[in-house]
Image: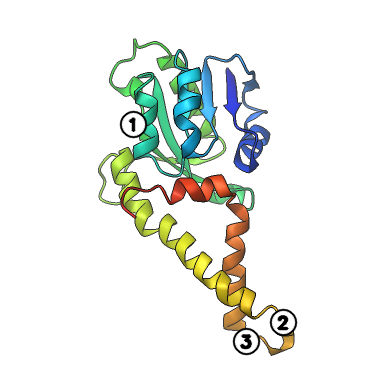
Amino acid sequence: MKINIIGDGSFGTFLSELLSPLFELDANADSAILAVPISAYDSVASENCDKHLINVCSVQKPSTETLLKYTSSVTSIHPLFGRRTPADKRNSIVTRKFSAQNYDLPFAENEREFLNKFSQISKLAVTDPSGAAFTPDSHDRLMAKTHVAAVLAAKQMKVFVDRASDIPDEYVPNSFRLMREFVKTLDDMPAGTIESIMANPYY
């Protein structure tokens, strides 16, 4: 299967590395992953409206709604992992599969093949903790309590970590070291990712 990964930032580059053994990366492919900040979704979708668009945004409701303005062939999936995540801890939440409703739709086979191959690099969650099927909306409600909270906490802790940058390590308690390690999670989140996370409608 051919696939195009739009976006050459930190996550787009990482996805290219992960997926190149499974897919033929081709800028002209009928299926395109949008590895761009949510602010770029509208313009990128309008330029690729005749394709199968794969939404990997950290916020799913507004990004999915944007893509659906241009095509019904939208697969929405949120990879809950980054470059530092161990391979056996990679999880993703699938919030929309268009082929589930109609197997005869254009690109339905593309979606099935994409999800099948993506499942080789990440576990796919399709139901929420209550057992109901994930939707973009239920995903964002969950992420508002977890993903958004982690970013906000790390940003606040970074203020304290930066304020103590002049203190020699031997005078730093272990609790502060743990806090400093947590703040490093921001290093895995480029500005575009943080922008997308903070666009959560339930924040």
Number of other residues with Cα within 10 Å of mark 3, as a class: few under 14, some 14 to 19, many 20 or more: few
Cα distance in 3D space between marks 1 and 2: 47 Å
The colouring scheme, among rainbow, by chain, secondary structure or one colour, is rainbow
- Viewed as shown, does residue 68 lie left or right of 153? left
Q: Report whether residue 85 is seen.
A: no
Type of the residue with mark 3: Pro
Disc 1 element? helix
Residue at the image position 25 percent from the left and 43 percent from the top: 132
Residue at the image position 54 percent from the left and 51 percent from the top: 89
Residue bearing the label numbered 2: 166
In this view of the protein, which residue sits in the foreground, 21 or 195? Answer: 195
Type of the residue with mark 1: Glu
Residue at the image position 46 percent from the left and 63 percent from the top: 152
Q: Report whether residue 138 is seen.
A: yes
In this view of the protein, which residue sits in the foreground, 160 or 12? Answer: 160
In this view of the protein, which residue sits in the foreground, 18 or 39? Answer: 39
| x then y, percent, for residue 173 | 62, 86
Residue bearing the label numbered 3: 173
**Which of pointers 3 and 1 lies earlier in the amino acid sequence?**
1
Label 2 vs label 3, nearer the camera: 2
**Which of pointers 1 and 2 lies earlier in the amino acid sequence?**
1
Cα distance in 3D space between marks 2 and 3: 14 Å
| x then y, percent, for residue 108 | 40, 16
**Which of pointers 2 and 3 lies earlier in the amino acid sequence?**
2
- Viewed as shown, does residue 193 lie left or right of 26? left
Residue at the image position 34 percent from the left and 23 percent from the top: 69
Type of the residue with mark 2: Asp
Disc 2 element? loop
Disc 3 element? loop
Residue bearing the label numbered 1: 65
Label 3 vs label 1, nearer the camera: 1
- The relative height of residue 141 versus residue 11 in the rendered view (above or below) is below
